Amino acid sequence: MLNFKIKTHKHGRFYNTPHFFILNKGNNAGKPSFEPYRNAFVIFCNNQSDLQKLYWICAILHAGSLFKPYHKGSVITFVSICDIKNLIIECLFNYDGHYWQERFKVLKKLEEAEENLRKQSVNLKNYKILMMRSYQPQLN
């Protein structure tokens, strides 16, 4: 089983060991990222391979909305550190490398496609703006 530590992230702090962040507040609570969030937990691992496995497990949990049942609060929802830790430990306990590796690959491809579509959308908006700005009405 993979060893990891999870702590509350303090904004502006930098870490030397392999790590990633998990958003802990809002409707996207549970979303993993390598970039720090203001309201996040930080997960530390012993090495890069363990880090990649844990990151993609958390990405799969988030994509499958498996953090949603643990959301608490009425105005601003949040997830507690012990709920995230217990869910990750449960997934690691049931971890079957072959089963998860396929999902890692598929999710990575889907995220790349999603990023590509996001870039295309931005380019289309910019093209629309440029097209409208280039129009010069004829005034009499």
Image (cartoon, rainbow, N blue to C red):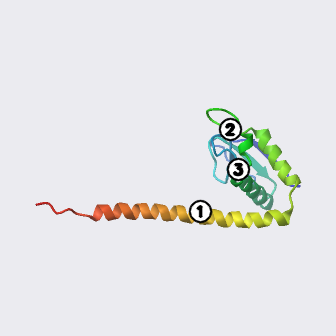
Report the residue marked by disc 3.
65
Up the image or down, 2 lies above or below 38; here it is below
Q: Amino acid at mark 2?
A: Phe
Please tell me whether mark 2 sits on a helix, a strand or a loop: loop
Residue shown at 47% from the left, 61% from the top: 122
Check the image and name the residue furthest to the top: 74
Please tell me whether mark 1 sits on a helix, a strand or a loop: helix
Residue shown at 70% from the left, 50% from the top: 65
Task: Tell me the quarter of the picture where residue 69 sits.
Answer: top right
Q: Amino acid at mark 3?
A: Ser
- Tell me which numbered mark, 3 or 2, is placed earlier along the sequence: 3
Report the residue marked by disc 1.
114
Residue 103: x %, y % from top left: 75, 64
Task: Tell me the quarter of the picture where residue 75 sits.
Answer: top right
Residue shown at 80% from the left, 62% from the top: 100
* Label disc, if present, on residue 78 of the rendered structure: 2
Residue 77: x %, y % from top left: 65, 37
130 on left or right of 52: left
